[in-house]
Image (cartoon, coloured by chain):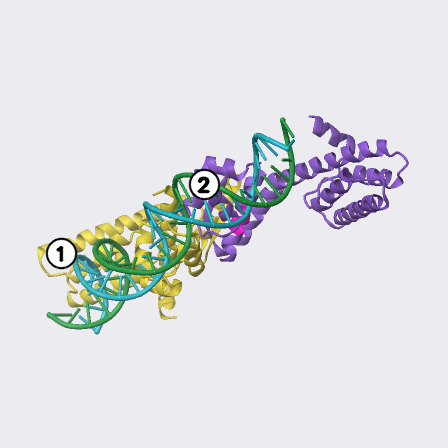
Chain colours: A yellow, B purple, C green, D cyan
Amino acid sequence: MSYVIEHIARTIKAAREAKGLSQRALSEKAGVPQSHISRIESGAVDLRVSSLVELGRVLDLELMLVPRKATSAVQSIVRSSAESAPSDDDTSRQALKELKRLQDSVAGLTQLYPAVTELAQLQRQVRELQHFRIPRYDQEAIRDAFKAVKSFKDTTAGLKAISDAYAQLRTVRNALAHGIADSTEIEPVRPAYSLDEDNNG
Amino acid sequence: MSYVIEHIARTIKAAREAKGLSQRALSEKAGVPQSHISRIESGAVDLRVSSLVELGRVLDLELMLVPRKATSAVQSIVRSSAESAPSDDDTSRQALKELKRLQDSVAGLTQLYPAVTELAQLQRQVRELQHFRIPRYDQEAIRDAFKAVKSFKDTTAGLKAISDAYAQLRTVRNALAHGIADSTEIEPVRPAYSLDEDNNG
DNA sequence: AAGAGCGATATATTTAAATATATCTAATTT
DNA sequence: AAATTAGATATATTTAAATATATCGCTCTT
């Protein structure tokens, strides 16, 4: 199994996810069994060219034979076109969705337990994170926080879980704030109310 | 048989010829039977990706999946890198070889038949054509002229064949001269003596 | 808890590429 | 004329992709 085939597998998977398609949806569009797509994406199949072309058609990818000396030029074109639109858009949208979900849960919980300062603290942190809109985002921390909130109980352990979630999200926030300070290519920060408009739009 | 596969077949063949390899030579380098290469180049085979990658390795071609929106940018890169070196170089070299061969034959014949004006005329035309050095070249006319010269006899038919060859080459010359006038991307014309140096170099 | 969605895995069969070899035809070279 | 080279075509066999279906395990939603 060559490096190129692994790379193609990765590219296919990334493109599919970028389009928000499940393997079954792609299967229908491309006329390929889902089981085959699973194997393709895991790099277990040495595709025929025609099969790859058909998958590429659905995923807006074109198969090309490029002279070796033009390879790096082509790669930088591919890279810049890849980074500027789909992945950036996709990642932020996904992250925002999860943040929104987290905020709703925390808000509900804060109303139930108005005297729990850990919850208020977490809520403030989540709100602040919504001000950030950049590609490099740590969604694991958001999911962990969501789990802590979902399973919250007014016990010592429950409170500790909320504190830990808060600490984790603050770490993420600091990393992002640090990234903004260092980077010259990050998009401007958007206010929370603008974010709300987006979700309701 | 899809358009892409035909295009790949053409690309493989062109790259092989650009490198001056026979199918048997490529066969050895790529570890693929010559019979298979023949079928591949005729577009009769829906290759596996790994097979295409291996052929590409030998022919200095890389297989890439390019986002559709970047396709035209990539194609212009490929085109410019293709036109600047191998195809231009290859076509001109091949054409020059055949022109040289033709000129040698005509020269010999003109010495044998110094009174035949058609031959003198053809010789002048061939000499003039050697002043042109551009990719788009009609080699068929050169081959036809060579055949006429090779099989020349001092008969009416033989003289007609020479006249026809001359007319054909003049048509080519005119098309090339016209092409130079219209195009902004053609290389400068090189003098014949420079051409001679090249062949002796 | 049941149902739905998702990706991974299994089984059986068909299809065509890949492999190995040989030969033919045409053109060129010796 | 004989030999060599080049590309196309043929035959037989093996290999793995493609096709068709089904099911499993995990996660999320209702």
Q: Amino acid at mark 1?
A: Leu
Task: Give the residue at x 26% y 51%.
Answer: A170
Taking the magenta stretch, the answer to whether it contains residue B8 is: yes
Q: Are marks 1 and 2 in contact (CB under 8 Å)?
A: no
Taking the magenta stretch, the answer to whether it contains residue A185 is: no
Q: Residue D11 location in percent, x, y?
A: 42, 49
Q: Is residue A59 above or below residue A185?
A: below
**Dot 1: element:** helix
Q: Please tell me how crowded label 2 is: few (under 14), some (14-19), or many (20+) other residues with Cα within 10 Å.
A: few
Q: Chain of mark 2?
A: B
- Main SS of the magenta part reads helix
- What is the quadrant of the N terminus of chain A in the image? top left
Q: Please, which residue is most extreme toward the left here?
A: A155
- What is the quadrant of the C terminus of chain A in the image? bottom left
- Write down the residue under mark 1: A159
> With A172 as the anchor, is A191 left or right in this view?
right
Q: Is residue C2 above or below residue B38?
A: below
Task: Give the residue at x 80% y 46%.
Answer: B161
Task: Give the residue at x 32% y 61%.
Answer: A33
Same-subunit check for callouts 1 and 2: no
Q: Is residue B78 above or below residue A152?
A: above
Taking depth in this image into account, of B76 and B125 the one nearest to the observer is B125
> With A105 as the anchor, is A58 left or right in this view?
right
Q: Residue A148 location in percent, x, y?
A: 17, 57
Q: Quadrant of residue A35?
A: bottom left
Q: Residue A169 location in percent, x, y?
A: 25, 52
Residue range corresponding to the magenta coloring: B7-11
Q: Quadrant of residue A118?
A: bottom left
Q: Chain of mark 1?
A: A
- Write down the residue under mark 2: B33
**Dot 2: element:** loop
